[in-house]
Structures are given as C-alpha cells and as structure tokens.
Image (cartoon, coloured by chain):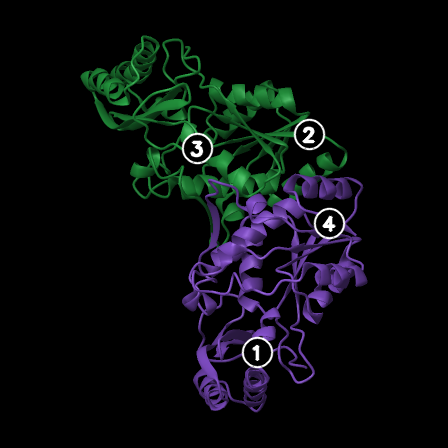
Chain colours: A purple, B green
Amino acid sequence: MNVIKSVRKMQSYSESIRKRGGKIGFVPTMGFFHEGHLSLMKEARKVADTVVVSIYVNPTQFGPKEDLSKYPRDFDRDLKMAGNVNVDCIFYPSDREMYPAHYQTYVDVEKVTRNLCGLSRPGHFRGVTTVCNKLFNIVKPHFAVFGKKDFQQFISIKRMVDDLNMDLEIIGYPTVREKDGLAMSSRNKYLSGDERQSALSLFKALKVAQKMYSAGEKKSASIITKAEKLIAKAPFTAIDYIKICDAETLKDIASVNDKTVMALAVKVGNTRLIDNHVFGEKLEK
Amino acid sequence: MNVIKSVRKMQSYSESIRKRGGKIGFVPTMGFFHEGHLSLMKEARKVADTVVVSIYVNPTQFGPKEDLSKYPRDFDRDLKMAGNVNVDCIFYPSDREMYPAHYQTYVDVEKVTRNLCGLSRPGHFRGVTTVCNKLFNIVKPHFAVFGKKDFQQFISIKRMVDDLNMDLEIIGYPTVREKDGLAMSSRNKYLSGDERQSALSLFKALKVAQKMYSAGEKKSASIITKAEKLIAKAPFTAIDYIKICDAETLKDIASVNDKTVMALAVKVGNTRLIDNHVFGEKLEK
C-alpha cells in the first residue's frame, strides 16, 4: 500500500492511473476507522480498480469551540485496517500541504448547507466542501464514496460536484450501525457507558418515526413531537434539532413522503451525535 | 473546428485527448474577439497541441446595473477569427447548461478580490472564479491563458488554482495595445471618437508613472497624484480608482518597487475601462 503525503505526488500517481484507463475510487476520511469507513472502502473497490483513501482531519470544518484538537487519531491502526480491505493508496497530507500560507479560497454551496447542522455549525459545510473540492482535484477519482450517516454532507458534496461540473460520481452508502442500532461514528469513542445507552434514543426515535409513517401519519409536526419526547426522556441528552426535510433541497417540509428525510442532532453528555432516515428507505441495524 | 455546446460532450472530448497523452491549452473568453484574444490563442498553441476556446458571457460576473444585456456579441465573426488562428474547438454553452435550476455553488477567493475592482464591483470576481472553476472542470486543460490587461482577474484565478489544487498551469499574457497605446478591450467598441481620444489618458498615465519611477520616485502617493491630474484633465473621464499595490497580494503599498502594480479604472463617458502596469515590466504599445 502506498502512503503519499504530497499533493504533486498524489496527482501524478492518479494521472498515471487515468492515462492507462484505470478507474479510481476514493474515500475521503478523517481517519480513526470503524466498520463504517471499511464499508465505504469495500464499496469503492466494487466500482474501481484502484482505491485511494485520504486521512485528513480538516481544520476548516471545525468551529472555534469544537473538538479539532481532541478529535481521535490513530494512523498506524488506520493503516493496518485499510491494508486489510486492500486499499491501494493512502493520501495523508499535512495542514501545511493543504493550507499553505496565504490560503484564501473557499467553496460555498449556498442553500442545502444552511439548514440542519448548518444552523448550529456555521462555516462547517464551507470547510467540508472546500476540502473535498481540493481532495477531488488532488486524487482525481472517477468515484467518491460517502456515508449517508452524514446526510447533509453527502447532499452538499453532490450539489457541489454537479454545480461545478466536477467529472466524478458521488456514491452514497447506507449508514452502518452497531448491533443495537447506534450509527457508527468516530465520536462514539467519547461516550461513557451510560451515555452510550442514552445515545440509542436517536435510532429508536427514527424507528418510531418510520413506524408512524408506515401506519399512515403524514404530519411532520406529529412525528417530530413524538421523537422529541422519546429522546428528551433519555438521560444526558440535549436536542440540537429534529427536523423533517425534502431529501434533496433539505428544506423543512410539513408533510412526510418517501423522499423526505428525518434528521437529528443530539448532544449526549459532551458528544454531539447525528443520525437520519429517509422514509422511503430501509432502516436496519 | 469543433463547436461543442454540452458540458458532457466537452468533458469526453477533453478526456479522450488527455488519455492519448495530448496537451490541452485553453482560452476562456466572453467572445467579440480582438487582437488580444487572438494573441492568447496563439500563445496557447505554443504550449499545447489542442487549443480550446470558450465563448460565454457569464451572467454571474455582471452586477445588476452593469452591461450584461448589451455586452457585444458576434458568434459567426468569432468563429471565423478563431478558425484563422487554428483553434481546434470552441466551447459555446448556454446559460441553462452552465447554471441549471437550483444552481447554488460559488468559489470565493477572499483577499486578492477585495481591493481594486472588487471595491466597486462586489461579487464580480466571485462570478469570475466560479465560472473559471467550472470551465476548468469542463475543458480539463493543461494550460489556460489569460490576458494581463485584467490583472486582478489573472491574479485571482492563479490564486484559486493554487489554493484548490487544480492541476493546470495559468499563463499570463501581456496586454495587447492599439498603435496609440489603448489597451484592447471588447468594451472599446462603446467609445465615441472623442471618448476614444480621452481614453488614451489611461496609457499616458501609466507611461508617466513608469517614467517617474525610473527617474527615482518611489512614493506611491506622488505617482498616483500625477496620474490623477493627467486623467482628470481629459474630457469625459471619471476616475474610479488609481492604486499602487503589491503585484501578488494586491494590497495597497506606499512605496513602489519592481513587484508593484499600478492599476486604474476610469469611466470614459459611460464606458468603464481598466489598465495596469507592473513597474518591473516593459510598457509598450
């Protein structure tokens, strides 16, 4: 497995693959891998003959009071795990390589980034779309695979790629869950045992929402109220938002249908967790 | 000569050239060609075996009160002129192709776009960098050639390409001037005979500035005052700005050196003209 740290070297690696007609599948990550990441890598392997994974904790997507400095990192462990699923190349740049002195360019997707997490994390998605734009220009993939756990991120990046005519395909992969339903996330590591138990209320709320919808309830407000009660009852929880939105525009929507998404962000202790469910799709552990 | 109107077709045209190892030189334009444009196309020919020119009057770089609707256009004439300098392909998209419904992504280069024309044309450079970002993703060039007449545009695009790791080289080409020194511009067409005469004051001011600098004057303020007087004396002129800036950061600078640029924007009648000169470079007709 190659480990490349320089932008120029990564570009010429990818260019040589493209020239011989190879297809590049790309999984951008912030490292500290779990089963969710590995699933994305395996998915990339299905559509491409070369799989590139980036490991980069991108500072521009963290707010000043967020967990940038303590975000979990374990490069050696990540390397082994990526090797086990036959990743061909790890792109592992430094901050200096990604944001040299006088850096000043940002990519902003204006509408879909403003609701949901955009409300409580201003600038977050600008950081995400900017770094992904850079990574796509560096890795030059034919496909990039993103987990749908970060639904708004997935939609924002798809939108950026379409709008800016970036010549690659964005593939969304269903949320990978623990046996009890908790969505996998590197941030789950922060949870104490009791918090971990409370965190299950996010999945339970989505389950109840789907059940209400299947039983004929179409009013977003009713479903949201039920979910709020369920989550508020769990200890250590503080709801940031629970919303039902159009799954493409991410605008709030009053009446649920198969193309709407229920998205939620909840602080459990000090850890902010997100989860979501599109009503027309399966919700499985 | 190929004329391509669709993004997808342009991308596959360029991809096939790249795959066979060909080099693509690109000249983005708003059409209504003059000698300046043709020089850029010839320059592209020097470094590339395939020359692509885009003709697109980009609405997102015009302010609400600017001359978008009356910007001069003559596609058939442009086609002939491009053919005469052996352009291989014209990319000629519609607004709908470039900015479909729900379009919402913008690329902003934050610092170098804020001074000079950025002061009187807010949003202009955001439109320029966004459309160039799109065009680079569509045409996939190895080289793109820009005239240095639009100096701030040239600097902003170089900055964007560097910052976003776009894998192409930006080439700046010296301003092409009429015999009497007037910088070539599609907008010169708007000038009456008398205005055309007054418009020469821009070039004259740059000449005088260079002369003062060569004679040992290093104070920006003194040079600017002299230039202001010269231009104000010409009929029909209204100065937007005359500034001396660092030629890379475009920050105002009090003391002139070889790496500083004198940039000016002047309305002559209803026509806004720009011109510039880097003190360390030649200033020729």
Q: Chain of mark 1?
A: A
Q: Secondary structure at mark 2?
A: loop
Q: Chain of mark 4?
A: A
Q: Secondary structure at mark 3?
A: helix
Write down the quadrant of residue A208 in the picture.
Answer: bottom right
Tag 3 and tag 2, C-beta contact below 8 Å = no
The residue mark sitting in front, 3 or 1, is: 1
Marks 3/2: CA distance? 24 Å
* Residue type marked 2: Lys
**Residue B55 at x, y percent in the picture:** 52, 33
Tag 2 residue: B23
Tag 1 residue: A191
Is A175 placed above or below A56 here?
A: below
Tag 3 residue: B153
> In front: B255, or A117?
B255
Marks 2/4: CA distance? 29 Å
Marks 1/4: CA distance? 31 Å
Write down the quadrant of residue A247 in the picture.
Answer: bottom right
* Residue type marked 3: Gln
Q: Secondary structure at mark 4?
A: strand
Mark 1: few/some/many CA within 10 Å (<14, 14-19, 20+): some
**Residue B128 at x, y percent in the picture:** 45, 39
Tag 4 residue: A3
